[in-house]
Image (cartoon, rainbow, N blue to C red):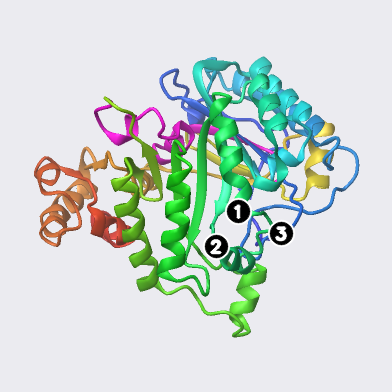
Amino acid sequence: MSPAQPDGQPWDLRGVLLPQLAEASADRPLSIYVHIPFCQVRCGYCDFNTYTVGFGPGADRVSYDSSALAEMRLAARILSDAQMPARPASSIFFGGGTPTLLDPAALARLLEGIRQNFGIAPGAEVTVEANPESVDEAVLESLREAGFTRVSFGMQSAVPTVLRTLDRRHDPTKLPGLVLAARQLGLDVSVDLIYGAPGESLQDWEVSLREAIAMEPDHISAYALVIEEGTKMGAQVARGELPMPDPDDEASKYEIADRLLGEAGYVWYEISNFARRESGEEGPSTQLRHASKHNLAYWRDWDWWGFGPGAHSHVGRYRWWNVKHPSAYAQRVTQGFSPAQAGEILDAQTREMERVLLAVRTSEGVDAPRAGAERDTFLQALPTLASEGLIESAPAAQGRAIVTLQGRLLADYVTRCLLGY
């Protein structure tokens, strides 16, 4: 079981959002996340809210979609009552867990539920995560026919020994065929990599990168391994069976990733995310066709609604999170109650702090606050950060912070300087 949810304040069982706090705006996009909480095997590093078994009606793989559909209907009413303008989803992401453990027909019903309750914007990005062992070409074709436009494969590594350390069970030789099949079906393809696993050498990491690049996906994510409390790997580290990831080793691996991906035509748009630049494409990397719209929704602090047990949502000044257990979740939504466990109402200072913290991770950077002591602190930090080579000099002179490669490696430090912490 992953760590407990944050404490927060108790949430209204009806899920009511007050219009003045929901901050209705037709100009602020709405994104939707659908959490599928089931996996075949729980990976040793994973602290997500996932389960290898089901828990009865509305909380197992066969009937889970009925619970998520009930929450969608409830959410549509809540947003309407909060006087939010109708906003079709600009991006949709099915994550987990392993969403493709559900029957493709169930995933299609969930996507149709989004269409009926919220609408789906023209050109919306509709992503489903998949493990290589959980799909084949027929499943991919069913997903495309249902309306999915993008598949994100959990590759993690191309090296069998590293996959075993991470408790990943898939055959890495299967993935190239799946990526090719997905692209031939017209799906955008992303692959996720993890670096810093105990025992992974620099050569291992370069092998994984080159294998990923050779498949020519549209998007590659490269995440540093983080050992979380409450995970199997966390317990192994605590017992001295595995070492903690080495920050210097992870920095070296990130630099290798940036170099190899850049040489192959991939451009960073968020510290851990790289999009393939198409021939003739110009402009900021955050505007590239293959940059994930859903990723950017989080980094730009837009509205999103997370459906499913343990999912988090954010609308205006509201943030809340659902009960974690699938049974408790199913019981709440079946009875017509909000599944929210708790949440918080963000004040102006917190929102400004989070704006800086999130946007500094993107290639478009972050502008100084408009006024007040926060603006003074931000502007005073820019010359020093530029002189240290952590942010680009020209934007800094105009009151904007855009991190360099070294700044990406020290993004937390840059953020603290900009905020005066």
Q: Is residue 264 left or right of residue 321?
A: left
Q: Residue at x 13, y 55 (%)?
A: 386
- Which amino acid, by three-letter code, is at mark 3? Arg
Dot 2 falls on a residue whose secondary structure is: loop
Residue 258: percent from left, percent from top:
32, 53
Disc marking residue 86: none
In the rendered structure, which segment of residues is drawn in magenta? 281-310
Residue for badge 2: 159
Residues at circles 1 and 2 in contact by the CB criterion of under 8 Å: yes
Asked whether residue 309 is drawn in magenta, I would say yes
**Residue 71 lies in the magenta-colored region:** no
Q: Relative to 399, is 205 above or below? A: below
Question: Quick one: 151 or 260, which is closer to the camera?
Answer: 260
As displayed, is residue 187 above or below residue 203? above
Quarter of image, res 74: top right
**Of callouts 1 and 3, the N-terminal one:** 3
Describe residue 391's horizontal placement relative to residue 23 as left or right: left
Q: Which residue is mark 1?
A: 172
Q: Of label 2 and label 3, which has the lower sequence position? A: 3
Rendered location of residue 112, percent (x, y): 70, 19
Say which residue label 3 marks.
42
